[in-house]
Image (spheres, rainbow, N blue to C red):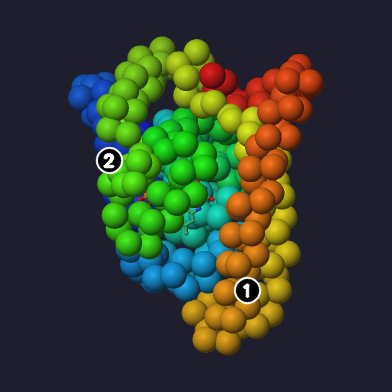
Amino acid sequence: MKKKVLVVYYSQTGQLERLLKTMLSPLKKSKEIDLDFLKIESEEKFTFPWSFFKFFDAFPETVYLDAPKLKPFILKENDYDLIILGYQPWFLSPSMPIASFMLSDTVKKILKNKPVITVIGCRNMWIEAQEVMKELIKKCGGVLIDNIVLTDQSGPLESFITTPRWMLTGKRDAFWGLSAAGISKEDIKASERFGQRIAEKLQADYEKDYTSMLKNLGAVKADGRFVFSEKIAKRSFRIWGKLIRLFGKRGALIRRPIVFIYVVFLFTLIVTIVPLNMALSSIFRSLFKEKMDKILSKIELPSGR
Ligand SMILES: Cc1cc2nc3c(=O)[nH]c(=O)nc-3n(C[C@H](O)[C@H](O)[C@H](O)COP(=O)(O)O)c2cc1C
């Protein structure tokens, strides 16, 4: 019997779409596998590139998973052997369109008792978003068996410039000595190894007892420098998000001044707390290596490095 695999994803610039299509090409080529792609779209289009206010005004609803309605979609099958969920974090949370999907009624039918692999394509801060995603998958009755994470080629600090530049202007080329934004072509090409492994393990029925397929393949590597920064930033997003939502709905003019104040606060956080935290995390890592390794290994579950 052919194995049926569903890939659900959202991709605003097309990066995650390219990644998934390349990564999963070995499944596409296999005569033993039927591969369906479902690209979800919300009724409200998130225009790319973003305007400055639309970008930052989106964070309260993203963090509170107050997601917009999705356009209707049709699935080819009712029952899949494996579900692959491709998503990108927005403000340390699953992006709004994918959150809409995870909160929809359909998802419960598709995911119940199904093995799930998450694929994340992002700048480099995905840990908090994946914790939310783990909960959402659990609530739908799905079982997370693997997680694949690909991050931008820019370093952690330069990507604070290159990614927002890409999101706000559409330009992702290298400039002023900084690397190009986004995931490198080489990393995308090399991701075929995951598809190859998934295709092999599907033939060996790994999905039937929810066994991880991607061990020892470098599917995920949590960066210790971000663990605490993400926690602090997520907390601030929640506090400020709650406050901003008191001023009105997303897009309301009345929200602009408070969103602007938050942006100033966020930039201050990025130039002070983030580098300080990265330095402190390095010290913490060297002093409490074992403890830190334990924290990172837990984050990297179920695939591991
Ligand atoms: C509103 C917004 C917020 C983002 N927040 C994060 C984030 O918290 N962490 C991160 O690593 N990347 C973040 N990114 C980058 C995305 O995860 C992703 O790399 C980029 O949007 C390209 O994805 P796509 O074109 O496939 O949708 C953000 C992007 C957007 C548009």
Disc 1 packing (10 Å; few <14; some 14–19; many ≥20): few
Question: Alpha-carbon distance for marks 2 and 1?
Answer: 36 Å
Vertical order, 192 against 204 (above or below): below
Residue 176: in sight, yes or no? Answer: yes
Q: Secondary structure at mark 1?
A: helix
Residue 37: in sight, yes or no? Answer: no
Can you tell me whether the CB of the residue at mark 1 lies under 8 Å from the nearest atom of ligand 1? no
Judging by the rendered image, the residue that carries numbered circle 1 is 261
Q: Nearer the viewer, residue 244 or 74?
A: 244
Vertical order, 160 against 114 (above or below): below
Q: Quadrant of the C terminus?
A: top right
Task: Find residue 5 and report its horizontal and vertical position in percent.
Answer: 36, 33
Can you tell me whether the CB of the residue at mark 2 lies under 8 Å from the nearest atom of ligand 1? no
Q: Label 2 is placed on what type of residue?
A: Arg
Horizontal side, residue 279 vs residue 55: left or right: right
Q: Secondary structure at mark 2?
A: helix
Disc 2 packing (10 Å; few <14; some 14–19; many ≥20): some
Q: Quadrant of residue 246?
A: bottom right
Q: Quadrant of residue 169?
A: bottom left
Vertical order, 152 against 25 (above or below): below
Task: Find residue 41 and report its horizontal and vertical position in percent.
Answer: 36, 60
Task: Check the image and name the residue furthest to the bottom.
Answer: 254
Which of the two discs, 2 and 1, labels the residue nearer the N terminus?
2
Q: Residue 18, labelled with which disc? A: 2
Residue found 34% across the figure and 67% down from its top: 47
Task: Check the image and name the residue furthest to the front.
Answer: 176
